[in-house]
Amino acid sequence: MRKMRGLALKIAAGYLIFTFLISAALGLSFYVVAKNYLVVQARAALRQDAQSLAQVLSGLPLEREAIEPVLFRWLATRPAERFFRSYYVVLDAGGRVVATNLEERFPPGSILPEGESPREARPPRAKARKTFLEHEFVLATAPIFPGGKVIMFSRQIALQAVRRDFLLVLFESLAWTVPLALLAAWLLARHIARPLVLLRERIHRVARREFDDPQEVHTGDEIEDLWRDFNLMVQRLAEYDRAQRLFLQNASHELKAPLMNIQGYAEGIRDGVFKGEEAAAGLEVIAGECQRLKKLVEEIIYLSRMETPGEAFHFEDLDLAALVRQAAETLQPLARERGVSLEVHAPPRVPVRGDREKLLRLVMNLAENALRYAKSRVQFEVGVHPGAVSLVCRDDGEGFLPQEIPRIFERFYKGPRGSTGLGLAIVRAVAEGHGGSVEARNSPQGGAELEVCLPRPEGR
């Protein structure tokens, strides 16, 4: 649990740091961008107001008594103040102040020399103190027909105050957002960590070989996929564990019977129970059971090697048709002894990529199994298909019972005339080791039919 809590804290801390960095970057970006934005917006608004007032005053004599009523009406119809305070100065053709809403700074009658910027102008009676025009400001002008002009301006410091106010509002909102984001991050981290805690507990149970019913986790994301794959792995581990236990039980049973026969006859011969011909027959039984034990142990070892991860396959270019003919020729004496014909139907050459010894073992096991149940004929048929080659072994025996087919390739599963119960299990292991498959079925013409499919080498 401690590690899972650590994961939750790491996720929450990472989320908080990320939120802080984004907030800092957003605040800095806002502070830099807002300055230019406010100046541009202020200049546009001042220009619009200056043009509007100049249009209203055009054609009027630029005298205070004449324009004050017009200014009053213009101010009354003017939209409410924007996010900054603005001021106006009306100048006549000589640059004399006619009217202003900042009379203490620009007394009517004072002169702004023509051609000078407002920054350079010095209104009368303002020399003893710092004037407005000595501050940074934003301004816009508009001419009045037939002469004069309107100056609209606003202090830069006012715009900076607006910017600080906006920034303060931003940080106040972040002060509420960050704790909520932290809470959401903590809940999200717990939501992510909880399935991992359950997975860790499940892993410990599996390590104790407790393959109980799989626990489902529904998160709708990769963690759910991880759980699904883990449950699949546990299911296969449970199947493998059951198979191993069954293998040990079956191996013990298969080894016990011949050992008991050997022990019984050996003790009988030793104690004089069997004499003469009986003793000779007993020795034959002992020799036969020893041979049976040897074959059983060899096949157990061989199958264990085949099912061991990393078992080496020595692949080379082979002719499957020639391999089948070689196995058939080897088993011809056994086939004649049982009165069964062993036939091979194959093209002249069927190229495959495989391990010669293992593929030969596969063919021999198929043939030996078919010879036990065939009445008069065992047939091999080799075929070439797009991307694959097939090897079909069929006999004219009684075929498989329906309940037998799913278990044909299980280790130690034996039919009525089975030998060790490992032959077809080895066939499946060899086929799968070559990237192929094997299938058991009953032939439409009667008898059993086993088909092995192997990958076909590219370009052949």
Image (tube, rainbow, N blue to C red):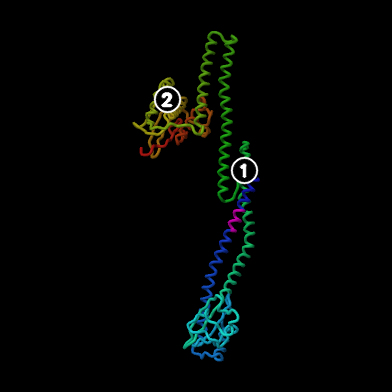
User: Is residue 333 among the parts visible in the rendering?
Assistant: yes
Report the side of 102 relative to 380 (left or right): right
Q: Quadrant of the C terminus?
A: top left
Q: Which residue is mark 1?
A: 200
Q: Residue at x 39, y 26 (%)?
A: 326
Report the side of 460 relative to 86 (left or right): left
The answer to which of 439 and 308 lies nearer the viewer is 308
Name the secondary structure under disc 1.
helix
Residue stretch rendered in magenta on the structure: 13-20
Image quadrant in which you'd find residue 267: top right
Q: Residue at x 57, y 59 (%)?
A: 22
Q: Residue at x 64, y 48 (%)?
A: 5
Is residue 256 placed above or below 134 in the rendered structure?
A: above
Amino acid type at mark 1? Arg
Mark before the other along the chain sequence, 1 or 2: 1
Name the secondary structure under disc 2.
loop
Q: Position of residue 263 (x, y in %)?
A: 58, 16
- Mark 1 vs mark 2, foreground winner is 1
Q: Position of residue 170 (x, y in %)?
A: 60, 66
Q: Is residue 233 magenta?
A: no
The answer to which of 12 and 156 lies nearer the viewer is 156
Q: Which residue is mark 2?
A: 376
Q: Residue at x 42, y 37 (%)?
A: 455
Amino acid type at mark 2? Ser
Q: Position of residue 81 (x, y in %)?
A: 58, 78
Residue 168 - label: none
